[in-house]
Image: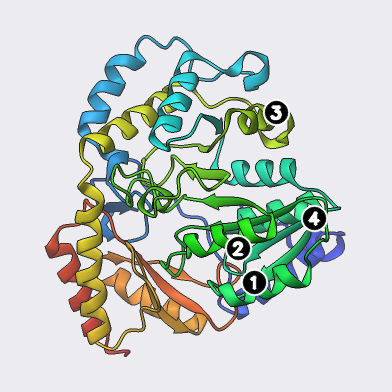
Amino acid sequence: MKPNEEFYESSPLAWIRRDLEKLEKNTLRRYLQCCQANNKPGRLLLEGKEYINFSANDYLGLATNKTIQKVLYAQAKKITSWGRGASPLVTGRTEEHASLEQTLAEWKKQQAALLFTTGYAANIGTIGALVGKEDFVYSDEKNHASIIDGVRLSGAQAVVYRHLDMDDLAKKLQKTKGQGSRRLIVTDTLFSMNGDIAPLEEIVTLAEQYGCMTMVDEAHATGVFGKTGSGLCEEAGLSGKIDIQLGTLSKGLGSLGGFVAGDQVLIDYLANRARSYVFSTALPPAVALAGTLAVEEIKRHPYWGEELLNKARWLRETLSKMGWDTGSSCSQIIPLIVKKAAVAVDISERLKNLGIWVPAIRPPSVASEESLLRVSLSLAHQQDDLMTLVEGLRQLKVV
């Protein structure tokens, strides 16, 4: 619907139009689009046209996995309600939720787990429950927005350290030593834009030295890293040394929801104190069931993650040789760093014209002058798909 021009000129909301115009001028305005839901693995259908999709976080292709779909459809017939209509603490939690929580806890080698509606809700709820205005949180400067917002909402003193810089973290821990009732170090394990990995062993060492709680967000590592695919904590052998492990069901697991795994006393506390858990309606039971099936499928195919990382290694090395700046990526997320927002948008549009969907990432998703194209690989991508991307980027001749 076309906005009422006269209304916006005279109303208290007139500033909204000016703000949108400013975003447009700086190539930062986004527009909603409607994709068709019947996508093929590794593909995107938009306005009747199919694209090779390098924008999704469905890293293992489980969102369209036929084995999961077959079992899910058969078992979902037993579930007589789609929505729950209540929070988990009232009557929202079902056997499907409890089963998924147990499955996640065992997978993560933890005593218990707690389901949230999203990974975002898991972060803001958990951080807000653990720290307050008398406390300190030490946060990597490139942590996800949900972590940043969780710290802000908690009221705790935020101490931001340079990305992956353990010397800087150590200095800031030393400078604030003895301050705050509680101290928390929080980081993504795999960073969503740069595709690089946090030095977890060093973080654990510093946390032990300075008496800090440790909290990690495994959103983009879950399903891809580790012997059983549970994430980078498993891969680093630190499952029992990190206090709070977060994850999501919406990326490598191809479903929806977030979760926290840890000691039973932590989970009991969060169930009582995490506001985004207490005051949210529980996930639909069928969604929880889909999460359980996804974990089981990954455990049956522990080699999937390595296959995906091998594809990413080949693509990253090929693009680097062509002159693209892929930063410090060592995962299935490969940034093509171009710095300028307008350049990122231009390249993304030109790739789109070639039938290749690679999103332009601009502020506020990244810092100013750090705009990039984010190539997100999936196990569903075939070698021909990767070659199409390589040739498309070569054809553009922008490097």
Question: Amino acid under label 1?
Answer: Ala
Please name the residue shown 43% across and 36% down the image: 109
* Mark pair 1, 3: CA separation: 35 Å
Q: How are the colours assigned in the image?
A: rainbow
CB atoms at circles 1 and 2 under 8 Å apart? yes
Q: Badge 3, how many Cα within 10 Å: few under 14, some, many 20+?
A: some
Q: Which one is earlier in the sequence, the residue at label 4 or at label 2?
A: 4
* Mark pair 3, 4: CA separation: 21 Å
Q: Which one is earlier in the sequence, the residue at label 3 or at label 4?
A: 4
> Which disc is residue 156 wearing?
4
- As drawn, 397 above or below 279: below
**Rendering coords of residue 14 (x, y %):** 81, 64
Question: Amino acid under label 2?
Answer: Leu
Q: Which one is earlier in the sequence, the residue at label 1 or at label 3?
A: 1
Horizontal placement of 271 versus 346: left or right?
right
Horizontal placement of 334 versus 52: left or right?
right
Question: Amino acid under label 3?
Answer: Val
User: Which residue is denoted by mark 2 in the rendering?
Assistant: 206
CB atoms at circles 1 and 4 under 8 Å apart? no
Q: Is residue 140 or residue 75 the one in the foreground? A: 140
- As drawn, 14 above or below 362: above
Q: Which one is earlier in the sequence, the residue at label 1 or at label 2?
A: 1
CB atoms at circles 3 and 2 under 8 Å apart? no
Placement of the C terminus among the 4 image quadrants: bottom left
User: Which residue is denoted by mark 3 in the rendering?
Assistant: 278
| SS for callout 4 | loop
User: Which residue is denoted by mark 1 in the rendering?
Assistant: 170
**Rendering coords of residue 87 (x, y %):** 65, 22
